[in-house]
Amino acid sequence: MLRGLVPLPTDALVGAYYPWAGQNWGFVAGVPYKNISLTDVFSQLYPGRSLAMDLIRHGSLPLWNSFSFSGYPLLANWQSAPFYPLNSLMLMFGNIHGYGIMVFLQPILAASFMYIFLRQLKLSRVAAGLGGIVSAYSGFVMVYLEYATIGQIMIWLPLVLYLFEKYFEKRQIRFLALSSICLFPVLTGGFFQPAFYVILIASLYFLFRSLSLPGTTNKPKLIALDAIFILVGIATAAIQLVPTAELLKYSIRNLDRNIVDYHYGLLPVQNLVSFLAPDFFGNPATTNYWGVIQYQEVTGYFSVIAFALAILGIFSKKKDWRLNLFSALFVGSIILAFDNPIGRLIYQFKFPLLSTGYASRWLIITAFSGAFLAATAIERFNQKKLTFILSALLGILVLIYGLIWKAVIPISPAHIPVVLRNLLLPIALLITGIAICIFIRNKNWAKWLLLILIAFDLGRFTVKFTPFSDPQYTSRAIPVFEYIKSQSKVDRVISDSGPILPANTWMYPELYSPTGYDPLLIKDYAVFFRGLNMGQMKAPEINGKLDGGLFTRYLNLVNLNSPFIDLVGAKYLLTVKYDPYGKIRPWGKINEGAIDLSRYKPVFEDGETVVLQNQTALPRASLYYKAESETDSVKAVEKLITGFDFRNKLLIDKENPTQYSPGENDMVEITDYSANKVNFQVKTQNGAYLFLSDTFFPGWQVSINEKLGEILRADSVFRAVEVPPGNSHIEMSYSPNSYKAGATISAISLLFIVILPVFKICNRKIKGGKERPNKTPHSV
């Protein structure tokens, strides 16, 4: 950070993908990149947040993303997280540096909040420090560090628990009110599963804390009070939750093949070894990962020494309700993360929301619980028992090492050197831990040395995985993009297959595309894109079954000859040049076997990248005079596939559509195109249909000459408006009721949280008359 770099993996963007890779960034052989597995950060998460902050910065609500999927809800997709409080850093310091500062602050805040929570429980500084470091730098949190989602949400959990403890100590309602407010960043942080885990742990903690109180009189009231404040805290985030619930209803989330293809993220039993050796299956930062799913989804590591301490905490003789709770969470989360009959239940019974996420993410709870257990174990430090556990774990790793060395465990010969090399460090850490327990007789010294050893272990793990990049990688003007912007304001761009223009990265230069990548992709648009990639063909029947089966969250264009590329207004195609050996070279040629040069005309080149203009693309906005009724969006796509004349006729979701006659001087012009609003100037002699190749979605409204009109669904997923004769000013605006309802609920909830503690204080003062003076220490 002090060198001017930012914690973002954009080094992989400019090092591996064109047109960025074709620019001169000051390296002789291109930009070296550290971790190609983090592409989601620069192709999904950072672009969405940047767009949201740009809209807020310019006085607009962050409701609609006009750049991807031919238009798509922005606020509702959750991961754009426009109302997450720490995103304000992006407003203050600019998108790239603000995002970097937010990422940088995550472990600092996480460790600090865990520290004050453990200190509130009267743990020593070394125990609280160990718990803070383990929870802040645990594997799952660190591999998702630059996503700014999981870790950003989990940092608030220890703060909530601290406020609970303060409430039970002081019995002042303001602490519960503050804990409710903490749920706002939890639920606006952009990721459902960690938010659910925070609410789950917080609820269980308050429940067991209430039940642990002596006596039985107030326990039901306490539990009810907590339930009220948790529900109100959830309601504060309704501004995010209600629009997201609406999008979920229309999305592919329950039909996402990505979850199914990876066996729902249920981990095989052999992955238990990752608790002891995080890189047993390799590491994407060293390009030798060979495990299941992807590295970010399987890393439950939180230091092999801390793991031993957590085991010691579980088997502690002096158990209290906190140790019992976190021990149960520790063991239960491991069971749910791995492939077993219990872990599969969530997916067999299709639990809402939970069944659409990877099971392996339960390891987030494992690490957090492990941090608490490790802190408790170091507080009650038992050197003999810890030595025994460390020795047992060392024996397991040495045995595994020997079995692999002797080829007893069947592993591919190519992977054996990776496994053996990556077992050496955890073995060395365990030996060092054993030496500390045996030879350092002063317990305080031994505790601090173990803390340092854990900090070194997790710090090394983090530094190995986490890339830093030059902030100019996403801000520099790229000639290819500048050319397209100079030629057109709203025409869309597509790309050929290969390492060029990855999903959503066209948002950096503010270009538009019909493709994209998002887990909450609108299902109707996904069905249309199936038809787009199929192209026009003779189908046996129109039966409404094109939406069957599973879908992918990646909308990649595979059929460059599809006529529907014209329908979405894709005027520019980006491709790269290859030499005779298939290598990308500035002196190479474009792949004429895949690209029809009678349709796509080369118009600009910059190094290896070529811009081709689609000669048959339709304008983004146009007038139609003929229409045919089709109220079923799936059948509409099937009709398009079977040869419907979409260039001269519309399919609209209205019975008995009006037919118009063309006028000699009819025209349409887009006069303003922004995120939540599109303005047109239209002139027709006899009336017409105004067609806009932007996605139809609830919440879009239209005014025709300042009178409310109706937006029709056209050609399955686009928008159309019936325009009267004469000159018309037409405005389409996005103002969804889901956002209005959510904002209202959030405002009422926040008002309740603020007013209730004030009311309690005022009521107490009124009942007691004058405020009592503070007691002196002597009177106490």
Image (cartoon, rainbow, N blue to C red):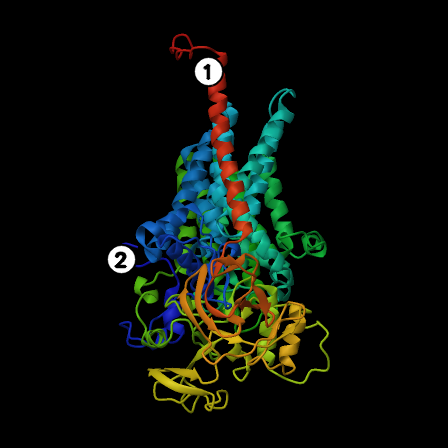
Answer yes or no: is residue 531 visible: yes
Q: Residue at x 50, y 79 (%)?
A: 663
Figure disc tally: 2
Does residue 74 sit above or below 668 in this rendering? Answer: above
Q: Residue at x 46, y 40 (%)?
A: 131
Q: Label 1 is placed on what type of residue?
A: Lys
Q: Would you name the residue on which mark 1 appears? A: 765
Q: Nearer the viewer, mark 2 or mark 1?
A: 1
Please state if 124 lies on the left or on the right of 294 as rendered: left
Q: Position of residue 693 (x, y in %)?
A: 51, 71
Does residue 176 sit above or below 644 in this rendering? Answer: above
Answer yes or no: is residue 320 visible: no
Please state if 422 lies on the left or on the right of 11 as rendered: right
Does residue 456 sit above or below 437 in this rendering? Answer: below
Name the quarter where the C terminus is drawn: top left
Q: Would you name the residue on which mark 2 appears? A: 3
Nearest the camera: 517 or 404? Answer: 517
Q: Position of residue 452 (x, y in %)?
A: 39, 45
Q: Determine crowd level at label 2: few under 14, some 14-19, many 20+ residues with C-alpha closer than 10 A.
A: few
Please state if 264 lies on the left or on the right of 600 as rendered: right
Q: Determine crowd level at label 1: few under 14, some 14-19, many 20+ residues with C-alpha closer than 10 A.
A: few
Q: Label 2 is placed on what type of residue?
A: Arg
What is the CA distance from the residue labelled 2 to the residue labelled 1?
55 Å
Q: Position of residue 124 (x, y in %)?
A: 43, 32
Nearest the camera: 701 or 704? Answer: 704
Q: Could you tell which of marks 2 and 1 lies nearer the N-terminus?
A: 2
Q: Secondary structure at mark 2?
A: loop
